[in-house]
Amino acid sequence: MIRRSISIGLITFACFSEAPLVAQEASKANEGAKGNDPSKAKEAEKEGSQPVFYLRDKSKIAGAPKFESLEVNTQYGTLSIPRDQILKIRFARRVAPELKAKIDGHIADLGNEDFDKREAATEALREIGIQALEALRAAARSTSEEVKNRASSLVEEIAKRTPEASPLSDETVPGLSGTDDEVTTIRMTVKGLIPLDQFSIESRYGELKVATADLSGVVFRSTGPQGLKIDIAPSYQPPGNWLDTKFDVEKGQRLKIEASGTVNVRNYGVSSGPDGNRDWGGTTFQNFPMLALVGKIGKRGQAFLIGTNHTSKTKAAGRLYLAVVTFSPNPGGANGSYKVSVQASGGE
């Protein structure tokens, strides 16, 4: 396996029995900070801007993880991802080594020649439940018809009675099945195993130790709005030529885009800012003003006018693309550029 580094980041976690109490105390402290004490208000505001760790018992912990970058083992090698690049982490369900050994033994007995042992193994796996689900899904692909049939039946039964549900909203951190953890960064999504067994969270109550097996996910986006600054030349013209900003937004985020600068079509003595030139008529892209700055979210997204200032709530997740509406009388004659600043914050 080749080891390499890229500019993104990852995690692995573990948990403790007092986490629900910590979350409740943190909630009470935040309520108290809404009073007239400025120092308490500032503490609450600071805590509200920190990453939020979601536990499988549906409690939450707000705090800063004590790492600068985290590693994830992928099929392409080990990647090291800086913390400030992470938007969200989802954790696959962990199974303790001793329990995994028992599950593997029971699955092996699903194909035992002794009928009573097959029945006993089936009942044991039924009682273990959701922690045996991934191993049973693998067993359901067995070449042994007996193992395949019993495992498939158990998968269906266990999934129905204990569905993989996330304590977070479906749009924030959907439930995660499988054996790979998932890290969403400002550039891409990485899947693989986060190898750490536990890590520390620096909270207002001190350092807390959390175990991976008890974590459902972490949302880092609350650390502040994600930003981008980029220049766009008028050579990027819709409908066929869009600038890929490599900036991903999520559904429900507040998207704020500001632009400045000038582009010129010298042969026609025309100048324009990001709002476009409305002095010229004729056919333009979706009737937007010529030389106007436009955007879309996703390759098949609906184009919208940005101009010098655009604010909206995103209706879908996807990559942000930018373009400058063609000056129809002279499609290739414009020069100059627009400076664009993008901020995305919040989300469902």
Image (cartoon, helix red, strand yellow):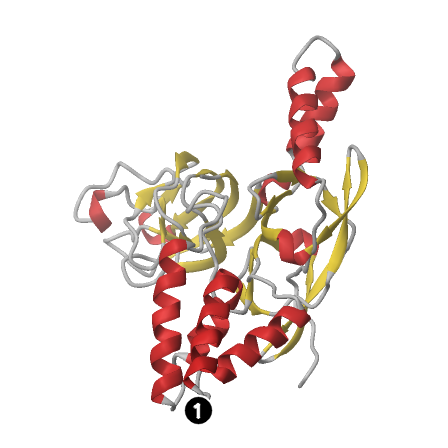
Give residue 104's quadrant in the image: bottom right
Q: What residue type is labelled 1?
A: Glu
| Residue pictured at 63% horizontal, 76% vertical | 101
The number of numbered discs placed on residues in the rendered structure image is 1
| Residue pictured at 46% horizontal, 88% vertical | 112
Q: Mark 1 points at which residue?
A: 113
Q: From the viewer's perspective, is 36 left or right of 312?
A: right
* Towards the viewer: 196 or 237: 196
Q: Residue furthest left?
A: 282
Give residue 83's quadrant in the image: bottom right
| Residue 207 horizontal/vertical position (percent) | 82, 42
Q: Which quadrant is the C terminus positioned in?
A: top left
Q: From the viewer's perspective, is 49 left or right of 183?
A: right
| Residue 146 horizontal/vertical position (percent) | 36, 85
* Towards the viewer: 55 or 108: 108
Q: Which quadrant is the N terminus positioned in?
A: bottom right
Is any part of residue 236 visible from this angle?
A: no
| Residue pictured at 51% horizontal, 68% vertical | 132
Q: Against 45, is 100 above or below?
A: below
Secondary structure found at label 1: loop
| Residue pictured at 62% horizontal, 54% vertical | 86
Q: Against 24, is 171 above or below?
A: below
| Residue 189 horizontal/vertical position (percent) | 52, 63
| Residue 94 horizontal/vertical position (percent) | 60, 63
Q: Against 88, is 157 above or below?
A: below
